[in-house]
Image (spheres, rainbow, N blue to C red):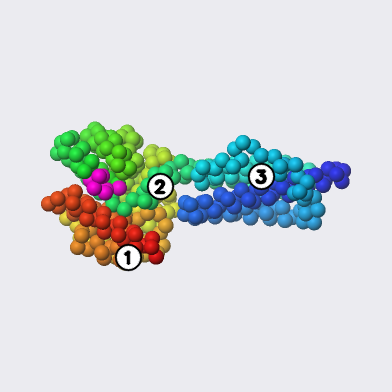
């Protein structure tokens, strides 16, 4: 290779290394701060370090000597979409494209210098494609993730005595302040549950509320609702995700901190935490209690909803743990005025959230 060709090669490698590093860092920052995805962040970080380690084996002085940013004609070329980034998701997708291209350029030009190093970059590129695909799938469901993140009041409902009553109940509760409905009724047939979930979803979406199916990922898909909630003994989160896809939510019930941490690892979008108190809906041998909520508030990043025996009289105790989301059933169902009860719960939750944001 001539001296001029070698200098041009080093110049290409230097520029591509900078682009790849910047692209990987851009993606790493979004998985870390935008998605709280620890494992994905670690994977991007490892690829970035591996590529940097390869390039560190090249003569640094040669790379720097070949650099000519001022004289680079590419710095004065712009495409029509260069500055069109409406959302962070647009930034991520541009970063994925830029990084993949840069890694391929590094690999190809390294072949002219050291085939061994080129093979290492090739493997890093393949790993990047896998991790980038995971990130893009997360982005697909990020609108629903944003909505569950902003949710405060989650209501478990049954299929009701008749369609009219059911539809009226969903509309009134959503208008009063319910953010998320979970349809849970072990007595009903699959057909009834699918019908009710479809109706609830249509109504709830008018109020920007979500509808999830309890346990049954297959019914959630059939009803085209917003996702499914599973328990510790039901369908695993990973299998539920395969059924409902990446554009729907999967929630998981948890009763202790190791289960909450596992929920993060398996990709749950949110967790239920409890039972906090004795409940009129279910009986339990043990209760997670307020201490569990405190642990969750300190250690878990995804949305967490306290559940189990929560009423107006003990809601302040729940909120004192810094868990500011609740899931309820009996306190609303058994109230003399369920709509007013939802409004009261909502007022307390909004007040607690406002105090937290003002700190």
* Residue picked out by circle 3: 103
**Cα distance between the residues tagged 1 and 2:** 23 Å
Residue for point 80% across, 56% down:
61
Counting from the top left corner in percent of width and height, residue 218 is at 33, 37
Residue 252 appears in the rendering: no
Residue extending farthest to the right is 2
As drawn, is 334 to the left or to the right of 201? left
Determine if the magenta segment contains residue 139: no
Determine if the magenta segment contains residue 178: yes
Which numbered disc, 2 or 3, marks the residue that appears first in the sequence?
A: 3
* Residue picked out by circle 2: 145
Q: Which of 49 and 340 is in front in this view?
A: 340
Q: What element carries label 1?
A: loop
Residue for point 61% across, 48% down:
23
Counting from the top left corner in percent of width and height, residue 233 is at 31, 50
* Residue picked out by circle 1: 321
């Amino acid at each position: 290779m001539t001296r001029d060709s070698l200098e041009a090669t080093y110049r290409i490698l230097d520029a591509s290394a900078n682009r790849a590093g910047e692209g990987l860092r851009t993606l790493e920052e979004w998985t870390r701060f935008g998605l709280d995805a620890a494992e994905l962040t670690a994977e991007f970080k490892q690829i970035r370090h591996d590529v940097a380690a390869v390039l560190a084996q090249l003569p640094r002085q040669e790379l720097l000597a070949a650099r000519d940013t001022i004289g680079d004609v590419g710095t004065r070329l712009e495409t029509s979409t260069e500055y069109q980034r409406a959302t962070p998701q647009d930034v991520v997708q541009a970063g994925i494209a830029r990084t993949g291209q840069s890694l391929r350029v590094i690999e190809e030009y390294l072949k002219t210098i050291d085939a061994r190093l080129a093979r290492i970059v090739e493997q890093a590129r393949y790993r990047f494609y896998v991790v980038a695909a995971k990130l893009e799938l997360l982005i697909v469901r990020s609108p629903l993730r944003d909505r569950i993140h902003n949710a405060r009041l989650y209501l478990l409902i049954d299929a009701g005595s008749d369609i009219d009553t059911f539809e009226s109940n969903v509309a009134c509760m959503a208008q009063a302040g319910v953010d998320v409905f979970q349809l849970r009724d072990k007595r009903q047939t699959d057909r009834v549950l699918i019908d009710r979930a479809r109706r609830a979803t249509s109504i709830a979406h008018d109020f920007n509320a979500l509808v999830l199916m309890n346990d049954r990922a297959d019914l959630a898909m059939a009803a085209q609702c917003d996702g499914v909630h599973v328990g510790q003994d039901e369908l695993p989160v990973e299998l539920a995700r395969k059924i409902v896809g990446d554009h729907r939510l999967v929630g998981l019930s948890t009763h202790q901190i190791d289960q909450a941490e596992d929920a993060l690892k398996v990709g749950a979008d949110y967790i239920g935490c409890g039972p906090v108190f004795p409940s009129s809906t279910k009986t339990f041998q043990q209760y997670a209690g307020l201490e569990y909520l405190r642990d969750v508030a300190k250690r878990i990043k995804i949305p967490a909803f306290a559940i189990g025996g929560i009423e107006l009289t003990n809601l302040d105790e729940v909120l004192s743990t810094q868990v500011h989301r609740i899931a309820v059933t009996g306190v609303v169902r058994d109230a003399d005025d369920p709509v007013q009860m939802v409004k009261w719960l909502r007022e307390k939750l909004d007040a607690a959230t406002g105090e937290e944001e003002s700190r």
